[in-house]
Amino acid sequence: MLAGVELTSAGELGIAEPEETGTTFFDNCMIKAKAVSEASGLPCLADDSGLCVYALDGAPGVYSADWAGTPRDFAKAMRMVQDKLGSSDDRRAAFVSTLILMWPDGHYETAEGRIEGTLIWPPRGNEGFGYDPMFIPEGESRTFGEMTLAEKKKFSHRARAMDKLKAVVF
Protein backbone atom coordinates (compact mmCIF):
# COMPACT_ATOMS: atom_id res chain seq x y z
CA MET A 1 0.00 0.00 0.00
CA LEU A 2 1.41 3.39 -1.02
CA ALA A 3 -0.45 6.48 0.23
CA GLY A 4 -3.73 4.55 0.25
CA VAL A 5 -3.11 3.02 -3.19
CA GLU A 6 -2.92 -0.74 -3.64
CA LEU A 7 0.01 -1.82 -5.78
CA THR A 8 -0.03 -4.85 -8.09
CA SER A 9 2.90 -6.03 -10.19
CA ALA A 10 2.75 -6.36 -13.96
CA GLY A 11 3.51 -10.06 -13.50
CA GLU A 12 0.46 -10.47 -11.25
CA LEU A 13 -1.60 -8.96 -14.08
CA GLY A 14 -0.07 -11.41 -16.59
CA ILE A 15 1.79 -8.64 -18.44
CA ALA A 16 5.23 -9.58 -19.75
CA GLU A 17 8.18 -7.28 -19.16
CA PRO A 18 8.90 -5.28 -22.31
CA GLU A 19 12.38 -5.23 -23.82
CA GLU A 20 14.39 -2.31 -22.45
CA THR A 21 15.92 -0.75 -25.56
CA GLY A 22 16.46 2.77 -24.25
CA THR A 23 19.80 4.45 -23.72
CA THR A 24 18.79 6.38 -20.59
CA PHE A 25 17.06 5.48 -17.34
CA PHE A 26 14.16 7.71 -18.40
CA ASP A 27 13.84 5.92 -21.78
CA ASN A 28 13.74 2.44 -20.22
CA CYS A 29 11.38 3.56 -17.49
CA MET A 30 9.04 5.10 -20.08
CA ILE A 31 9.07 1.89 -22.14
CA LYS A 32 7.98 -0.11 -19.08
CA ALA A 33 5.41 2.42 -17.82
CA LYS A 34 3.77 2.86 -21.22
CA ALA A 35 3.64 -0.86 -22.01
CA VAL A 36 2.05 -1.82 -18.69
CA SER A 37 -0.35 1.11 -18.54
CA GLU A 38 -1.55 0.48 -22.10
CA ALA A 39 -1.88 -3.29 -21.55
CA SER A 40 -3.70 -2.98 -18.23
CA GLY A 41 -5.68 0.23 -18.61
CA LEU A 42 -4.39 1.15 -15.14
CA PRO A 43 -1.91 3.69 -13.83
CA CYS A 44 1.60 2.26 -13.77
CA LEU A 45 4.61 3.00 -11.59
CA ALA A 46 7.87 1.99 -13.28
CA ASP A 47 11.52 2.19 -12.19
CA ASP A 48 14.84 1.98 -13.95
CA SER A 49 18.06 2.31 -12.04
CA GLY A 50 21.74 1.53 -11.98
CA LEU A 51 25.28 2.52 -11.09
CA CYS A 52 26.89 5.46 -12.91
CA VAL A 53 30.66 5.76 -12.65
CA TYR A 54 31.90 9.25 -13.50
CA ALA A 55 35.32 8.24 -14.82
CA LEU A 56 33.60 5.73 -17.15
CA ASP A 57 31.30 8.35 -18.70
CA GLY A 58 28.37 7.04 -16.65
CA ALA A 59 28.86 3.34 -17.41
CA PRO A 60 27.57 0.83 -16.62
CA GLY A 61 24.48 3.08 -16.22
CA VAL A 62 21.35 1.69 -17.88
CA TYR A 63 23.26 -1.51 -18.60
CA SER A 64 24.17 -2.13 -14.93
CA ALA A 65 22.20 -5.36 -14.52
CA ASP A 66 23.54 -7.06 -17.65
CA TRP A 67 26.89 -5.30 -18.05
CA ALA A 68 28.90 -8.47 -17.42
CA GLY A 69 26.69 -10.57 -19.70
CA THR A 70 24.13 -13.25 -19.09
CA PRO A 71 23.52 -14.83 -16.72
CA ARG A 72 23.94 -11.85 -14.42
CA ASP A 73 27.22 -12.03 -12.55
CA PHE A 74 27.84 -9.01 -10.32
CA ALA A 75 31.21 -10.28 -9.10
CA LYS A 76 32.31 -10.18 -12.73
CA ALA A 77 30.60 -6.80 -13.26
CA MET A 78 32.41 -5.29 -10.26
CA ARG A 79 35.72 -6.65 -11.59
CA MET A 80 34.95 -5.05 -14.98
CA VAL A 81 34.35 -1.68 -13.30
CA GLN A 82 37.63 -2.01 -11.42
CA ASP A 83 39.54 -3.08 -14.53
CA LYS A 84 38.14 -0.20 -16.58
CA LEU A 85 38.96 2.31 -13.83
CA GLY A 86 42.51 1.00 -13.66
CA SER A 87 44.69 3.45 -11.75
CA SER A 88 42.24 6.35 -12.07
CA ASP A 89 42.07 8.55 -8.99
CA ASP A 90 38.47 9.43 -9.86
CA ARG A 91 36.43 6.81 -7.98
CA ARG A 92 33.20 8.85 -7.83
CA ALA A 93 29.97 7.08 -8.66
CA ALA A 94 26.24 7.38 -8.05
CA PHE A 95 23.32 5.00 -7.79
CA VAL A 96 20.51 6.56 -9.84
CA SER A 97 16.82 5.70 -9.96
CA THR A 98 14.20 7.12 -12.32
CA LEU A 99 10.52 6.61 -11.57
CA ILE A 100 7.58 7.27 -13.86
CA LEU A 101 3.95 7.18 -12.82
CA MET A 102 1.87 6.93 -15.98
CA TRP A 103 -1.88 7.13 -16.36
CA PRO A 104 -3.78 5.29 -19.10
CA ASP A 105 -4.39 8.59 -20.95
CA GLY A 106 -0.60 8.96 -21.41
CA HIS A 107 -0.10 11.68 -18.80
CA TYR A 108 2.88 10.97 -16.56
CA GLU A 109 4.97 12.35 -13.74
CA THR A 110 8.64 11.51 -13.29
CA ALA A 111 11.29 11.87 -10.61
CA GLU A 112 14.94 10.96 -10.18
CA GLY A 113 16.77 10.00 -7.03
CA ARG A 114 20.48 9.55 -6.61
CA ILE A 115 23.04 8.77 -3.97
CA GLU A 116 26.60 9.91 -4.53
CA GLY A 117 29.54 7.89 -3.33
CA THR A 118 32.96 6.39 -3.95
CA LEU A 119 34.00 3.01 -5.31
CA ILE A 120 36.53 0.86 -3.47
CA TRP A 121 38.52 -2.25 -4.33
CA PRO A 122 38.41 -4.96 -3.19
CA PRO A 123 34.67 -5.16 -2.46
CA ARG A 124 33.60 -5.46 1.18
CA GLY A 125 30.53 -7.07 2.72
CA ASN A 126 27.92 -9.64 1.76
CA GLU A 127 24.72 -7.65 2.21
CA GLY A 128 22.65 -6.08 -0.54
CA PHE A 129 23.15 -7.03 -4.16
CA GLY A 130 24.77 -5.90 -7.38
CA TYR A 131 27.52 -3.34 -6.92
CA ASP A 132 26.77 -2.73 -3.21
CA PRO A 133 30.03 -4.27 -1.89
CA MET A 134 32.16 -1.71 -3.78
CA PHE A 135 30.05 1.43 -3.15
CA ILE A 136 30.57 3.70 -0.13
CA PRO A 137 27.88 6.41 0.09
CA GLU A 138 28.98 9.95 0.92
CA GLY A 139 29.32 10.48 4.65
CA GLU A 140 29.93 6.79 5.39
CA SER A 141 32.98 4.60 5.80
CA ARG A 142 31.20 1.31 5.09
CA THR A 143 30.03 -0.06 1.76
CA PHE A 144 26.39 -0.84 1.12
CA GLY A 145 27.53 -4.47 1.25
CA GLU A 146 28.52 -3.97 4.89
CA MET A 147 25.23 -2.34 5.92
CA THR A 148 22.02 -3.97 7.02
CA LEU A 149 19.00 -3.35 4.83
CA ALA A 150 17.63 -0.93 7.43
CA GLU A 151 20.91 1.04 7.45
CA LYS A 152 21.09 1.10 3.66
CA LYS A 153 17.49 2.32 3.30
CA LYS A 154 18.36 5.77 4.65
CA PHE A 155 20.53 6.26 1.52
CA SER A 156 18.14 4.70 -1.01
CA HIS A 157 18.13 6.32 -4.45
CA ARG A 158 14.70 4.74 -5.05
CA ALA A 159 13.32 6.18 -1.82
CA ARG A 160 14.64 9.62 -2.80
CA ALA A 161 12.95 9.35 -6.20
CA MET A 162 9.72 8.17 -4.56
CA ASP A 163 9.74 11.07 -2.10
CA LYS A 164 10.05 13.51 -5.01
CA LEU A 165 7.29 11.75 -6.96
CA LYS A 166 4.94 11.68 -3.98
CA ALA A 167 5.47 15.42 -3.47
CA VAL A 168 4.21 16.03 -7.01
CA VAL A 169 1.41 13.43 -7.16
CA PHE A 170 -0.04 13.19 -3.68
Image (cartoon, grey):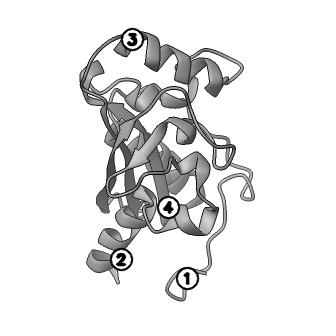
- Answer left or right for 13 relative to 114: right
3 or 4: tag closer to the N-terminus: 4
Marks 3 and 1, how far apart in space? 43 Å
Please report contact status of discs 3 and 1: CB closer than 8 Å, yes or no: no
Identify which residue, 58 or 78, lies in the foreground: 78
| Vertical side of 165 occupied by 111: above or below | above
Which mark identifies residue 5?
1
| Vertical side of 70 occupied by 127: above or below | below
Q: Amino acid at mark 4?
A: Cys
Q: What is the secondary structure assignment of the residue under circle 3? A: helix
Identify the residue at horizontal 62%, vertical 72% (top origin).
7
Marks 2 and 1, how far apart in space? 12 Å
| Nearest-to-viewer mark from 2 and 1 | 2
Picture quarter containing residue 10? bottom right
Which mark identifies residue 44?
4
- Within 10 Å of disc 3 (Cα), the crowding (few <14, some 14-19, many 20+) is few
